[in-house]
Amino acid sequence: MFSQLNLPQAQLQISKRENQFFVTCLVRKKKILLTPEEWVRQHLIHYLVVSKGFALGRLGVEVSLKFNGLAKRADLVYFNHDLEPTHVFECKAATVQLTTETIFQIATYNSKIKANFLMISNGLDHYIFENKDSNLIPIADFPVLN
């Protein structure tokens, strides 16, 4: 049903009710409708925690923010020990191509969040940026967390 991703396979709890699939969110610990974007988000969460050492308890999902009076939600935000945002992530379905519009979207969110690192992913392609003086500099990987 859902496509193979360029991320490690996550052990997800998937259930079906009335012809709809649901996944138990690794962060929110509740059943969420399993959309193609959610499929990518859950695999990305798994990758960040298992492979990159991110603390599950410091990840926020669909973090609310306001931009020009409009309510927006960042897909994932990672917070440091002082609860300051350090990373922001934007997930798209595997069928959605990552474009400059996707970069603009996450940059817009980050104008409010002020994270040091940004990542966009459709589960197949992943782009990571470091925010230096409000310029997004492409980088190969996140620095090691401390």
Image (tube, grey):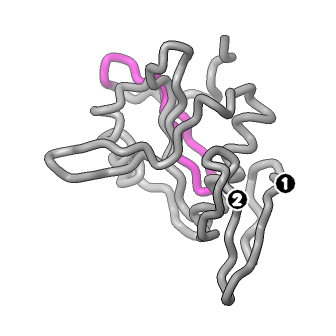
Q: Please indicate whether residue 46 sits to the left or right of residue 115 in the image.
A: right
Task: Give residue 109's position: percent from left, percent from top.
Answer: 33, 41
Amino acid type at circle 2 is Thr
The residue tagged with tag 2: helix, strand or loop? strand
The residue tagged with tag 1: helix, strand or loop? loop
**Outermost left residue:** 69
Name the disc covering residue 11, or none: 1
Residue at figure coordinates x 77%, y 67% from the top left: 14
Q: Please indicate whether residue 14 sits to the left or right of residue 122 in the image.
A: right
Residue at figure coordinates x 76%, y 73% from the top left: 15
Task: Give residue 77's position: percent from left, percent from top.
Answer: 50, 36
To which residue does mark 2 refer?
24
**Which residue is more in the foreground, 96 or 58?**
58
Compared with residue 133, is residue 31 higher up or lower down, i.e. above or below? Answer: below
**Which residue is more in the foreground, 135 or 114?**
114
Quadrant of image for the C terminus: top right
Magenta highlight on residue 129: yes
**Outermost bottom residue:** 18
Residue at figure coordinates x 74%, y 29% from the top left: 52
**Which residue is more in the foreground, 87 or 11?**
11
**Circle 2 or circle 1, nearest the eye:** 2
Name the disc covering residue 126, or none: none
Residue at figure coordinates x 70%, y 59% from the top left: 24
**Mark closest to the chain's N terminus, 2 or 1:** 1
Magenta highlight on residue 38: no
In the rendered structure, which segment of residues is drawn in magenta?
116-134
Which is the main secondary structure of the residues drawn in magenta? strand
